[in-house]
Amino acid sequence: MSSENKTPRSAVAPVETDADAAIRRLSRRSFILGGIATAATVGGFTWLMNAPPSDGIPGPLRRMLRFNETLAETFFQPSRLIPTLSLDRVTKPARVNGDIGLSEEVNLDDWTVQVQPAKAITATDDDFDEFTLADIKKLPRHEMVTELHCIEGWTMVQHWAGARFCDFVEQMTRFHDLKSVPKYVGIETPDGAYYVGLDRASALHPQTLLCYEMNGEPLTQDHGAPLRLVIPVKYGVKNLKRIGVIKFTNARPGDYWAEQGYDWYAGF
Amino acid sequence: MKRLEKKHPLFTRWNHWVNFPVLTVMICSGLLIYWADDVQRIGLGSVTLVHMKLPDNVYEALHMNQRLAAGMAWHFAFMWLFALNGALYVLYTLISGEWRNLIPTRRSFSDAIEVVKHDLGIRKQPLPATKYNGAQRIAYSSIILMGIGSLITGLAIYKPVQLSLLVTLCGGFPAARFLHFWLTMGYIAFFVVHIVQVARAGWSNFRGMVTGYEVANVESAEGSRP
């Protein structure tokens, strides 16, 4: 690659007998420059691959994911919905994927979900509100048939029913005004083995459900009984099964798969 | 009598060579992602002729297994460079007027058949001397359309809710994945043919893509190739 670009495209080099010498001179210059560029590229890749890792990937790549996240949050329109489909599009049988945090069967009679508001709002860390499934079911029921996109690439369609997460927040938590909801929501399984972090806008998206029914039946144990998260604006990994704890926080919550190299935001 | 002839503008050369490592990263990281759900196939209905996957031990030998997270991280960083470099190329080509050498003309399709005949040794007489022959015009314009296709299908897969219009345009999410995958196979096919043609065209032609100049014989101005 040469910086020589002054001659017009169709120009004839002045002394034709010197054409070979001229191309030799040009070649030497261009190939030296090309060699330097190649070395710089190799150097750049070496640097990138050996940069201090951040949660399983090179730090600079993690910073790019954060940059993409900022951009996605800036342009996020909560009014944009995932298309809802007709019942005949439901994937049968439903694929069961992921059992982290579901190692033992949950006792449905004892189950409650604990809700922890942001530290700034409550006096102590242990200040939990508790809700039963019956409490959640008092909220308006919403049904939808939507695609669930797994981060691996495959997609399935399911018929979900549950309460909108935003209704739950507004009517049952201390954040009656949705504007006062902290920046993040962290959700965990009862044993804490699986956990996801969500940005506020995605959590409060009108299609984000606290789901208790799938295809007209109460959730089965392997699909997250008695209550799971369905959040179609995120990859499947964020659709946590068997909710145990919901935390509202201004500190970015941990996320099981983000700690293994995946994008924390993982949103559509 | 020999003279130097300007062949490729400085911008085109830099753009071309920057694209090489960037597209390589996009394809390799794309394959790391594809590994996690390698479902594409050549077939119809329940009949599968070719399942587009490598054997497990080849994935392992190439260190391509279990690297979905890394694949996504690289893909979503280098997508910016890929898109930017491509957009700059399109802009430059339009503004500089280079597009006139690249857009297929009415004659390009019949020319392309002659080029293929020539390259297969069926046609004996030399090809007419032009900057880009019919086959090249078609190939170099198609690859730009493919790049735009990769961008559109990629964005549909990346943000299927915010950009659900693009998903619809692609014919649904699985269709977007299908197109995105086959466009990538298209790049690999393009690359193979490109390398063979560059090797056949010889050193002077390759040097033209580095220096920008080619040495031409004035009396017998022979057609210079890719």
Image (cartoon, coloured by chain):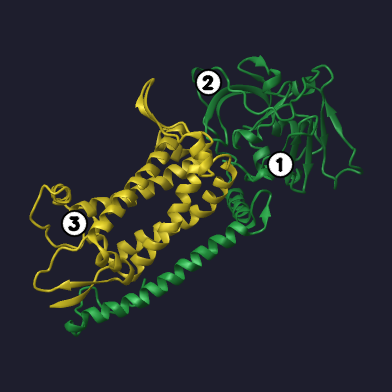
Looking at the rendered structure, whether the residues under marks 2 and 1 are on a common chain is answered as yes
Q: CA distance from mark 2 to mark 1?
A: 28 Å
**Label 2 is placed on what type of residue?**
Thr
Chain with yellow colouring: B
- Please say if the residues under marks 3 and 2 sit with CB atoms less than 8 Å apart: no
- The picture quadrant where one finds residue B45 is top left
Q: Residue at x 64, y 22 (%)?
A: A161
| Label 2 secondary element | loop
Mark 2 — residue?
A91
Please state which amino acid type lies under the numbered disc 1: Asp
Kindly indicate whether the residues beneath marks 3 and 2 are on one polypeptide chain.
Answer: no
Kindly indicate the quadrant of the structure image that contains residue A121.
Answer: top right
Q: Quadrant of the N terminus of chain A?
A: bottom left
Q: Reply above or below: B4 against A159.
A: below
- At label 3, the amino acid type is Asn
- According to the picture, the residue beneath numbered tag 3 turns out to be B133
Disc 2 is attached to a residue of which chain? A
N-terminal-most mark, 2 or 1:
2
Q: Mark 3 and mark 2: span between their CA atoms?
A: 50 Å
The chain letter for the residue carrying disc 3 is: B
Residue A251 vertical position relative to residue B87 in the rendered view, above or below = above
Q: Residue furthest top?
A: A217
Q: Count the marks.
A: 3
Vertically, is A157 above or below A11? Answer: above
Give the residue number, with chain letter if any, for mark 1. Answer: A255
Q: Tell me if A233 is positioned left or right of A42 in this view.
A: right
Q: Secondary structure at mark 1?
A: loop
Q: Give the percent coordinates (x, y) of residue A19.
A: 21, 80
User: Which is more foreground, mark 3 or mark 2?
Assistant: 3
Q: Is residue A138 left or right of residue B59?
A: right
